[in-house]
Amino acid sequence: MESRHLVLILLVLFTCCLSSQPETKFICHDGSVVSHKSDCPETDRYVCPNGRVVGDPDECPEPKPSTTLITKYICPDGHVVEDYDECGITSTTTEKTVSTSTSTTTSPPAGIRIVGLDLVEEYVEVANYDSSLMDLSGWFLRDRDDHTYLFPNGFKLLPNTLVRIHTGSGIDSPTDLYWSRDGGVWNNDGDTAYLWDSDLNLVDELSAILRGESTTSTSTPASTSTSSSTTPLPNSTTSTSTSTTSSSTTSTSSSTTLSSTSTSSSTTTSSTVLHGSILITEVMYDLPGSDTGREWVEIYARADRVDLSNWRLEEERINGVKTQHLLREYQGGMVLEQGDYAVIADNPDSFLKDHSSYDGVLIDSSFGSGLSNSALTLRLLDKRDGNEIDSIFYINSIGADGNGKTLIRDGSELREGSVDGGTPGS
């Protein structure tokens, strides 16, 4: 009997020891705390300081001394901490801030805004001044040279927080995104960051110049009202800036996805091809089924008698990787007269199978791995110095996304065509 009592006492003590071990919790990317990583929620909500996920920040409970202490946290990046705040989760409760502006004609910032541009450290800061979660899927940033960063699909920015977009490489998080470019983007002698939404509306822009050791930024969004100061965010960095108070809903700027085609006013020789002499007018970038060898680009001659021999078609992808494709004669020669169209095909034989009645100028230019089905900048470069004659930027939110249609140039914009297979040569 005594031995049986001794066994029971040992079992009780062992059970007590087990129950006193610290409980391991996981912190999801949205800041919520769960027992198992698979329990992380798929939808973003407000997260209280104690880790509780709620639909409204007012629902966050007041701290209680009797609250059970969780002694270990596993952060989204995998490292283990004893303090929740050490994970660096973005502040997730709405905090009220007061503008220090004395102007009586301006309003506090609203919506999604560019709040910082560092030319040396190579990053842009985008803030959400709205009171609700903002989905930035399909939004993109561009510089003056049309380098383009596309926000990750499904990325959401919490209210009253900002995200920093770095030019270099790294692991994306709720507060930091990475362009993964090998070289720099932002010109140290001055540059402008442009923010576009998924409907191709210009939401905001911010210019910066480098003076000594500091960067001075000047914001010029779509609306014309200006303010001498901005409402700071809890986790924002200090910068010298002049901002305006516009949002994407009040923008009056028309979306423009094409580079200017105005003729240069500089003195040129008769052998120089001017910018805009040849235009990219139609693009078949995503066909139903297999794309292999079937993609093509249509061009149009605005100038008289242009020889395309040894010209190149350049692709620049979102990550900054550029690829040039030499133009080679296939059908109809390489000289275009004013008003002529030509088609640059990835595989001319495959193109003619899809468009057997086409009898115009057809140029061979292998596209390698094919045109991007998400977003791409296309440039037409001459043979003389590799000067850009024309360029376009397309994104699949415009249309022609695998439905058999093409993107057609319409003035200063691209739009989805209405003809299956496109209208090459017309």
Image: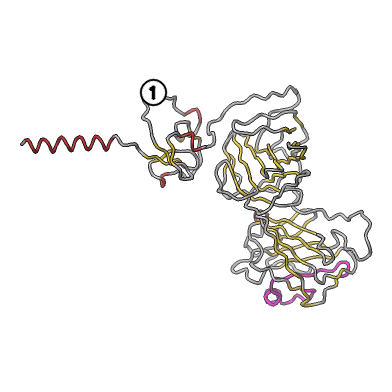
Q: Quadrant of residue 8?
A: top left
Q: Which residue is mark 1?
A: 65
Graded by Cα atoms within 10 Å as few (under 14), some (14 to 19) or many (20 or more), the crowding at tag 1 reads few
- Taking the spot 66% from the left edge, 43% from the top edge, the residue there is 123
Q: Amino acid at mark 1?
A: Pro
Horizontally, residue 1 falls left or right of residue 362, namely left
User: From what the image shows, is residue 291 above or below residue 121?
Assistant: below
User: From what the image shows, is residue 44 above or below residue 93?
Assistant: below
Tell me, yes or no, whether the highlighted magenta stretch contains residue 8. Answer: no
Which span is picked out in magenta?
A: 336-362
Considering every residue shown, the one lying at the far left of the view is 1
Quadrant where the image shows the N terminus: top left
Nearer the observer, 381 or 83: 83
Q: Position of residue 335 (x, y in %)?
A: 85, 72
Quadrant where the image shows the C terminus: bottom right
Q: How many marks?
A: 1
User: From what the image shows, is residue 150 above or below residue 59?
Assistant: below
Q: Position of residue 71 (x, y in %)?
A: 38, 34
Horizontally, residue 407 falls left or right of residue 81, namely right
Task: Classify mark 1: helix, strand or loop.
Answer: loop
Q: Quadrant of residue 18?
A: top left
Q: Position of residue 310 (x, y in %)?
A: 80, 71
Q: Position of residue 388 (x, y in %)?
A: 81, 59
Horizontally, residue 160 falls left or right of residue 244, namely left
User: From what the image shows, is residue 99 above or below residue 381?
Assistant: above
Colour basis? secondary structure
Q: Quadrant of residue 315?
A: bottom right
Tell me, yes or no, whether the highlighted magenta stretch contains residue 360. Answer: yes
